[in-house]
């Protein structure tokens, strides 16, 4: 079937369809547009195909019409549509607020921006599809305060001015301005609320007071409750591609059939972080956030290959892993770096650390649970 269309409408068409388009060109040259299709994701990023220009001589000083056609292969969009579909998914509910978790398989994978390192996560683990939203934070915190838990900070509704108040129409944005200590206490509260055994203890007692934690004394008693991810768990979930080898994926270990996102890509992106179109499709960051957090679950549009959203951008995420007296942050945020360095912190291999008491509107967290 042949349809007329403009290049700007390509991204909305179904795979396997031919398109005829017309474009007016002036001056002394005519562009004959030929497709160089790399992926359907390219279409979404740029609005239409990367085109190679061919000069056609002999037309001078007139407005003419240039005609060409392209075909979108059905298999490319089908691959993208499968993102996360083969990954086990489970839902939890806290006071009418639902959240979803995905099962990440333990594996050995490359680390660091240049992929020179290696890490192994021994056990499968469940990881939340999105960062903790303000509405989920608020509901669990209200229950926790009624059951002997105390927090340092009340939590902020994304980058809004609402702190500790009832959720508004921005409830789906990530909770921010929470310290690492608050996250430790909140995950214990979430575990207890949902009927799991809390993970974090101090001197053998369940940690319920964020104002009394000494970071070096926090013990992990993992019997399947909710907790913060380790830095390696976070990176595995951000890089995972399973058997999908597209967009520069790294096969690791060699000949294993397991593929991973390169360390200089945002999670779920189709190219390195300096490609603003590819990165903007995968993450909210300084180049496209309009100086605000955003509702979770939008980027990448189909999630990464585990079906996770906002692993890069929106908010940086606390990890449990210590670095000297600090704790590791991963993922980059909506306004972390200058326009000159836009996207640098979004790289899945990028690691930074900060004091556990730090609480700003750039930082949130997501939860994980060991698959016992």
Image (cartoon, rainbow, N blue to C red):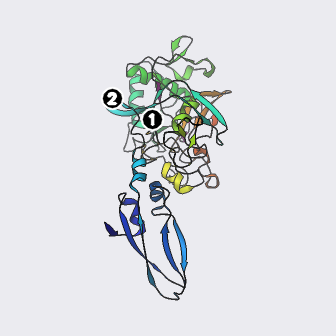
Count neighbours of disc 1 (C-alpha within 10 A) and say few if under 14, some if 14 to 19, many if 20 or more: many
Counting from the top left corner in percent of width and height, residue 37 is at 48, 60
Q: Is residue 61 above or below residue 109?
A: below
| Bounds of the magenta segment | 359-371
Magenta span: chief secondary structure: loop
Q: Which residue appears at 35% of the width and 33% of the height?
A: 98
Circle 1 residue:
132
Query: On the picture, is 344 further left or further right than 147?
Result: right
Q: Nearer the viewer, residue 207 or 259?
A: 259
Quadrant hosting residue 96? top left
Residue sitting at the far top: 204
Residue 84 visible from this viewpoint: yes
Please give left or right for residue 250 compared with residue 368 in the image: right
- Around disc 2, counting alpha carbons within 10 Å, would you say few (fewer than 14), some (14 to 19), or many (20 or more)? few
Q: Earlier in the sequence, mark 1 or mark 2?
A: 2
Q: Residue at x 61, y 30 (%)?
A: 119
For residue 180, above or below residue 62? above
Q: Position of residue 210 (x, y in %)?
A: 53, 23
Q: Which of the pair 139/352 is nearer the observer?
A: 352
Badge 2 is on which residue?
A: 95
Q: Is residue 23 above or below residue 266?
A: below
- Residue drawn at x 45%, y 59% is 43
Which residue lies at the image location 42% right of the left edge and 40% below the top edge?
84
């Amino acid at each position: 079937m042949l349809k007329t269309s403009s290049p700007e409408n390509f991204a909305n068409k179904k795979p396997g369809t031919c398109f005829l388009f017309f474009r007016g060109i002036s001056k002394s040259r005519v562009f004959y547009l030929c497709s160089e299709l790399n992926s359907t994701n390219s279409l979404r990023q740029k609005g239409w195909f990367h085109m190679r220009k061919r000069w056609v001589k002999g037309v001078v000083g007139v407005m003419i019409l240039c005609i060409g056609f392209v075909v979108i292969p059905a298999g490319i969009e089908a691959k993208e549509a499968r993102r996360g579909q083969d990954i086990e998914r489970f839902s939890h509910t806290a006071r009418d607020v639902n959240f979803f978790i995905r099962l990440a398989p333990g594996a050995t994978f490359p680390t660091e921006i240049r992929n020179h390192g290696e890490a192994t996560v021994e056990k499968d683990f469940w990881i939340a599809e999105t960062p903790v939203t303000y509405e989920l934070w608020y509901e669990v915190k209200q229950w926790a305060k009624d059951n002997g838990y105390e927090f340092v900070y009340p939590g902020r509704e994304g980058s809004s001015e609402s702190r500790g108040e009832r959720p508004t129409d921005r409830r789906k944005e990530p909770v921010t301005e929470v310290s690492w200590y608050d996250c430790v206490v909140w995950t214990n509260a979430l575990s207890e609320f949902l009927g799991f055994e809390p993970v974090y203890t101090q001197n053998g007692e369940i940690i319920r007071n964020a104002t009394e934690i000494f970071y070096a004394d926090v013990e992990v008693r993992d019997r399947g409750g909710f907790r913060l991810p380790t830095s390696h768990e976070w990176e595995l979930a951000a890089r995972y591609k399973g058997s999908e080898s597209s967009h520069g994926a790294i096969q690791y270990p060699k000949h294993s059939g397991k593929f991973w996102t390169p360390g200089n890509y945002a999670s779920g992106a189709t190219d390195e972080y300096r490609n603003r179109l590819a990165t903007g499709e995968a993450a909210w960051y300084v180049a496209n956030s309009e100086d605000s957090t955003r509702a979770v679950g939008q980027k990448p549009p189909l999630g990464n290959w585990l079906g996770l959203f906002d692993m890069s951008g929106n908010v940086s995420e606390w990890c449990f892993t210590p670095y000297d007296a600090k704790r590791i942050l991963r993922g980059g945020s909506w306004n972390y770096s200058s326009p000159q360095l836009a996207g640098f912190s979004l790289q899945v291999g990028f690691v930074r650390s900060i004091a556990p008491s730090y609480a700003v509107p750039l930082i949130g967290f997501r939860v994980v649970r060991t698959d016992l």
